Amino acid sequence: MANKAIKYRVYPTTEQSTMFSKTFGCCRKIYNLMLSDKIEGYRTTGKFPAVTPVQYKDEYPYLREVDSLALENVQMNLQAAFRHAFRKSHKKNNGFPKFKFAKHFRRSYTTNNQKGTVAIIDNKYIRLPKIGKVKAVIHRVPESGWLIKSAAVSQESDGRYYISVLFEFDKGKNAYIVDKTNAIRLDYASDGLYVDSNGNAGTNHKYYRESHDKLARAQCRLSRMQGSKKHEDKSNNYIKQLRKVNRIHRYIANQRLDNLHKISAEIANQYDVVCVESLNMRSMANRGFGNGKATLDNGYGMFLNMLEYKLSDRNKYLVKVDKWFPSSQICSCCGTLHPEMKDLSKRKMICDCGLTISRDQNAAINILNEGLRLLS
């Protein structure tokens, strides 16, 4: 069995939007109450007590107005946060759980499907518990045999609502035979997303920089309105201008996502094996490298995640080569090591064997060979 989530844009009514806001707030409230009681119980007894959302409904009757499964999922999220906090080697270890504040809280909640409580109706609506039918754009219809497991409702900073529906389906056996010679290597490039082993660049778009002036003007106007200062009451004009700023940010993010989805789908359809380098993008975005803004604008980390699951869906391979592999220092023709290529300012390798090649393309060829070696 396999899972796949499809995210749909929805258009709730005024009453449904109000109910969404209540559910977001109740989820945040119940999370903070349970976390507070766990901390207080540990101070008293030395152990974290077990807490459930049910024990707070008598004291806070408004918790009964929202979907109970949304509150149960909050409890599960808190339990997972505690498990991850005490596992030093866990990749999701974000430290001890923290309280959620309204200003920095992601407006979302998750509900489960129980005997059809979550359903897609007439390819026009999504039914949710306590909400009813919400108008949606069903841009992708699930295949027959796909079962709905859960639905995650979220509201973005620009005010738009989305529902991500999680489906479970039988992946089955794929008769596709992978051709390991149909392979390509992608080497990260801050000025073009990537350079492949054929010398082709990914994309030259810098969406944040292209909209930088428009965003700066909107933010400058926002900074002059009542509410921009700390502890100052926010005026209606401030709130409207803030939504304009958020819409610009969302537009930039959507441009980037659309471009990355198209490029990753094209590569996944064309090649059977893709070799990449396991880079630490957070470290590469450091100001000390001088290309932090370009790295963040590229979205290379998101691109690799998209590529990984799209190749996996097609029963193909994404091979990650260790980041310490000296791909830029090895001549892709004769194998001679060139320590001088550690200097990032050197953009072309000239080897005694007669090879003259760009730094990025040489690294791409080397990691393609190393990836195929690891795969075999």
Image (cartoon, helix red, strand yellow):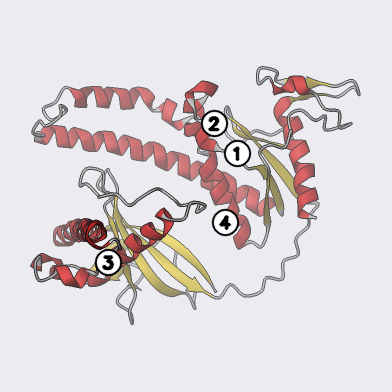
Nearer the N terminus, badge 4 or badge 2? 2
Q: Nearer the viewer, mark 3 or mark 4?
A: 3
Label 1 vs 3, first from the N-terminus: 3
Q: Assign the C terminus to one quadrant of the image.
A: bottom right
- In the picture, measured across the screen, residue 231 lies left or right of residue 53, that is left
Label 2: state its secondary structure. helix
Residue 279 has which mark? 1
Query: In the rendering, at what x and y percent does residue 276 appear?
Result: 66, 43
* Dots 2, 1 in contact, CB < 8 A: yes
Outermost residue toward the right?
353
Residue at the spot of label 3: 49
Q: Is residue 121 visible?
A: no
Q: Quadrant of residue 60?
A: bottom left
Distance from disc 4 to disc 2, alpha carbons, whole Å, reads 23 Å
**Crowding at mark 3 (Cα within 10 Å: few <14, some 14-19, many 20+):** few
Rendering quarter of residue 357? top right
Examine the rendered structure and indicate whether residue 273 appears above or below residue 361: below
Q: Position of residue 204 (x, y in %)?
A: 56, 30
Distance from the alpha carbon under mark 3 to that under mark 4: 38 Å
For marks 2 and 3, the one nearer the N-term is 3
Q: Residue at x 81, y 51 (%)?
A: 181
Query: How far, Cα to Cα, is label 2 from label 3?
Result: 42 Å
Q: Amino acid at mark 4?
A: Tyr
Question: Which of the two labelled residues, at mark 3 and mark 4, occupies the earlier sequence position?
Answer: 3
Q: Which residue is mark 2?
A: 284
In three-dimensional space, the C-alpha distance between marks 4 and 1, rounded to whole angstroms, equals 18 Å
**Quadrant location of the N terminus in the rendered image:** bottom right
> Which residue has dot 4 on it?
309
Report the side of 116 relative to 337 (left or right).
Answer: left
Residue 173 seen anywhere in this rendered image of the structure: yes
The mark nearer the N terminus, 2 or 1, is 1
